[in-house]
Amino acid sequence: MIETSSLASGALLANEGGGGLHSTAASGAFSALWLVVGLPLLGAVLLLVGGKRTNPFGHILATALALGSFVVGVLMFVTMLDKSGPGRSVDQHLWTWAPVNEFQADIGLHLDQLSMVFVLLITGVGSLIHIYSIGYMAHDENRRRFFAYLNLFVAAMLLLVLANNYLLLYVGWEGVGLASYLLIGFWQHKPSAATAAKKAFIMNRVGDFGLAVAIFLMFTTFGTFSFEDVLGGSATASDGTMTAIGLMLLLAACGKSAQFPLQAWLGDAMEGPTPVSALIHAATMVTAGVYLITRSAEIFDASPDAQLAVTIVGAITVLFGAIVGCAKDDIKKALAASTMSQIGYMILAAGLGPIGYAFAIMHLVTHGFFKAGLFLGAGSVMHGMNDEVDMRRYGGLRKYMPITFVTFGLGYLAIIGFPLLSGFFSKDKIIEAAFAKGGTSGWILGAVTLLAAGLTAYYMTRVMLMTFFGKERWKEAPAGAPADWHEPHPHESPVSMTGPMILLAFGSVFAGGLFALNDSFVKWLTPVTGFSHGDLPMSEWAVTGMAIAMVALGTAVAYLQYARREVPSVAPAASPVTVAARRDLYQDAINEGLVMRPGQYLTRLLVWFDNKGVDGFVGGLAAFVGGTSARVRRVQTGFVRTYALSMFGGTLLVVACTLMARMA
Amino acid sequence: MNPVNYLYLSALLFTIGAAGVLLRRNAIVVFMCVELMLNACNLAFVTFGRMHDNLDGQIIAFFTMVVAACEVVVGLSIIIAIFRSRRSASVDDASLMKW
Amino acid sequence: MNGHFPWLTTLAALPFVGGLCVAAVPAGKRRLAKNVALLFSLLTLAVAVVVATKFDNDGGRFQITESYSWISSFGVRWSLGVDGIGLVLILLTAVLMPLLILASWHDADEAPVGADGSAGAGRPAPRGTHAFFALMLLVEAMVVVSFAATDVFMFYVFFEAMLIPMYFLIGGFGGAQRSYAAVKFLLYNLLGGLVMLAAVVGLYVATANQGIGVDGHGTFDFVKISQAVATGQLDIDPTAEKALFLGFMFAFAIKAPLWPFHTWLPDTMTEATPGVAVLVTAMVDKVGTFAMLRFCLEIFPDASKYFAPVVITLAVIGIIYGALLAVGQTDIKRLIAYTSISHFGFIILGIFVMTSQGQSGATLYMVNHGFSTAALLLIAGFLISRRGSKTIADFGGVQKVAPVLAGTFLVAGLATLSMPGLAPFVSEFLVLVGAFTKYKVAAIFATTGIVLAALYVLVLYQRTMTGPVRPGNEKLRDLVPRELAVVVPLIAFLLVLGVYPKPVLDAVNPAVDHTLSRVEQKDPAPTKPIEQAAGTEAHTTGGSK
């Protein structure tokens, strides 16, 4: 299976395969494409405008519309299976948005194999999480609003992946950012939630800046920003331009996908309700960066420098997330760090070019299943534990919530890459692809991915052991517990919650195998992203063997630390490295020191400058005029004699001057 | 008689008038001094008319008289009004209209 | 074109007459006065809609024209006519006015607070309410004339005359420091206006010297002057042209306001009632940016090009400076004022980059900014009037007690930070794209404004609306129907223009193309153009027609 095709031929293949996105106008069943976005959008509008009147049935309506969108998506998928070749790529022009001469912004949708995968993932997982939320949010007084936001998110995310041009993609891009903001800050009365929401939005905006500039560059280079034209023309433009566009797109991806250096918001985003963390901050929205890079394959293929930058960012984040994940005691934050790390894998794979695009997407989908399942499991645990998130106050829960335990466990096995489960296939392929990049960088990337696989096994085993095994640490009151503390009574969650967890567990177990079977997933995506095997310097089995060895090692270390030894219910003092990891490798301190504090000083300085400087100048001028006139008006004594004398003097002066002029 | 002498007289009268305006405080006296200055001018006009053998100077003198008459009416009434309200005809007392 | 029904004069006369009627209402009948004002503003809106339907996007430059002799010895004429730019701004004015009247319903009922901050001293003036609404209508009339005037002198007269009612509106109603704000407003704008007057006279002399007018007189006829400039008939000496340009630009830069001539705006907006503050930013200031586009560029094309880099630099400074200052404010209204300074930077940037995207975007921005600022300020005003404080720190957790107010405030805030789907996004993006095609560095600096915008809006929202309910906010009422009637149309406009701005752009584009052809500027061609496949619509490159 190892082919020694060079990178260049890979790029060529990509251009032959997916270059230019030539597509046909949507007809037949495809003409219902707009409904995929329209249905959840309708739900959001109805629930937000309808207000309290829709309280009794809002959650049902929203779930039904999300499911409806899924059904339409499946219909599209079936139709697409029927077609072949270019017929699988369709465009639906809806209306002209903002036309100004060359600048022709259109509202148009584009469906091809790549967006199809996303549509199914978003609507599928999205629907499951809607169902889960019915139970999870049952007692929240603002449940209707929650569902409205969820629908808004699904609509925006679908718009993101279905847009046929970068500007509309930008709309979806910011739309998911907004939905994420609203949902992270859903419990607004908690200052921490409000702050986290704001932080997420603003860091995302930094990324959006990149996307905006990328679109400007596309427009100045190509005079358009539709996928078809930009991607089709990317091979003709200069390297410098393509690198600039690529780097700007990477910045955008970093913001949305919580990649280094814009990763700091994801951990805090766990302030949102857990279904939100599952849907937005694990399965779908945070993977938008991977979509963006894969969608822009031609741009990155045209710029090796930009690709290198992508792989570097991916590699750093893989390790960053994994290291942070090893030290977190908050179950959701540990999972969030894991998400960051896993997306790092995808970004890294996407940076490899045609060797990696398909695997990036494959990992994205399997990750969508198992990470959503893990988060829902975490939510189920919190549900039964009075919303406790500290894993040091869990332990031995497998007896109390068997379904959660089993589904969470399957997700756990999938994520660490246990052989023949989903994660095994997708992650293994990324490690292979990293090695297959060739050269020193290939070895480095391969080593990083292997190391991260070991770390993943370590931190996930840690989560698993601390939560479901060991002593029941929640039975004793924590130090400094409030007076009304009472022992939690762990219990299994209602069926509306366990149902989605079970379905996702199925996905976690079988999706990878299904995709890998006959390379069907890669073949499916090849027309869009292109594919090349790269140059693997060793046998595939060797890579797989090393990966499994790393996983076993990680698991074993975690077992020794957390199963053989008692887990203290308060975090013990630890080495500087652990402390750093607990504090997210000081990311917040760095951001604060480098950006926030200087920014605050700058604004304070400017406020002072505006008052004293700009306005002070104007005020000073006014004061000067006022002061001068105050002094000058003293001349007006009010005594007629004085006036007469000055008149007299003036007359004399005039006469004298006249005479002088005469004389001269 | 040399008409230039009338001019000297006129200049003398004007100077007396001007000095009075500048130095005196009683509004009535100031007023009279203003009249004196006007009449000094009239005298000069008439003299110049005589010297140049035309009537322009005399016509202007008539104008001045009419204007002066009007001025007297307005001025005196202002002085009387001020005197009524302030019980004083000193020009220095009416120094409120400053600034 | 006399003989047709004088639609534009009617449009301008209606609010004027309305103002007189309001003033004539007997002193005790406040409610009647308000209703009359509302009625006339609605009538004006109706006429404006009629005017809009009579406007043909593909018709000539100025349409619905009328021209009467006014001051014949100086060749001043009462000339009105609209192009697409003037039309959409007139529509903005006409749409906003009824909403502003409705929003200000109770603002002039009580005597304003004393200078020492003491609560309304005694009873209000018997006709205070009447005066307030009459003056607002008067301002509307003058704004409409300014947007429709095709005679430079006539424009100048109304541009300046606007200051009088504005002065009384700011100084007579509003916060404790209102007299200070009113005087500052007046002096700033008067200074600009006087410099402009000198330039207007200079322009007249230039036209007279070069025989553009009739019988050796000069002319103020804008159409004639701009044509003479375009054909080279009117060839002002470059130094003189620069001086005249600066004279015009100075007045408009103060009015707009462009950094560093902005400091009157925060004081004015903080002290004025919310309705008047919207009147200032959404309408009166738009006259400044509108006039830059109309007069500066077309009458002084060479000087405009010469000074464009300077103006662009100031605009970009304004964008970032305004945004940073907004972040640092502690007073809600002041914060919003600084966001406006930032947004005016965008508008001016769009005008002076001289690309079709930039200028169409800037025009659309004027409209959108009108709606978004109106929404943000008016809702903030409702909030402030409930709590009796403008200080951000006094609020907190409002979302809990008044969810609709908080929700609409968030929507308005999102519009202010240019969230896609809401109107300002389209215009901001157009401006930035238009700027980027010519001035990459300036555009990139300006784009950082979108990050800062997120910061100031969300910080404001977080501090006022989220978190635990702060003491003093427990009893805040949610929006009442009257206020909803103000907010809902504004948000509807923001949404509709965000999703379907095409009608506005279609009206604006021909006018912008015309302006660009007058300054002889073409959009830079893409470096690697994509050949359009047959069947897709072919677009003419460049702005010239």
Image (cartoon, rainbow, N blue to C red):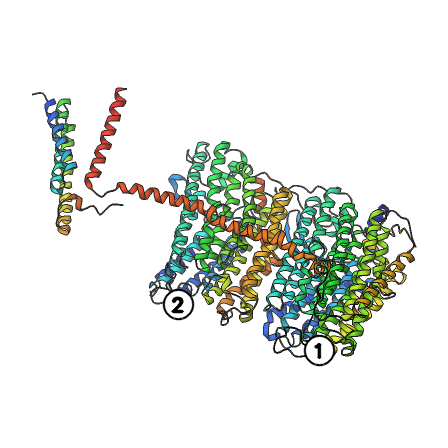
Measuring from the top left, give residue C193's x and y in whole percent. 42, 44
**How far, Cα to Cα, is label 2 from label 1?**
68 Å
Residue A475 disc label = 1
- Drawn side of residue A142 relative to residue A25, left or right: left
Label 2: which secondary element: helix
Residue C31 disc label = 2
Mark 2, chain letter? C
Measuring from the top left, give residue C388's x and y in whole percent. 45, 65
Q: Is residue A456 above or below residue C523?
A: below
Which numbered mark, 2 or 1, is in the foreground of this view? 1
| Circle 2 Cα neighbour tier, 10 Å, few/some/many (<14 / 14–19 / ≥20) | some
Residue in front for this viewpoint, C340 or A433: A433
Q: Quadrant of the C terminus of chain A?
A: top left
Mark 2: amino acid: Arg
Query: Is residue A247 at all visible to an observer of this figure?
Result: yes
Picture mark count: 2
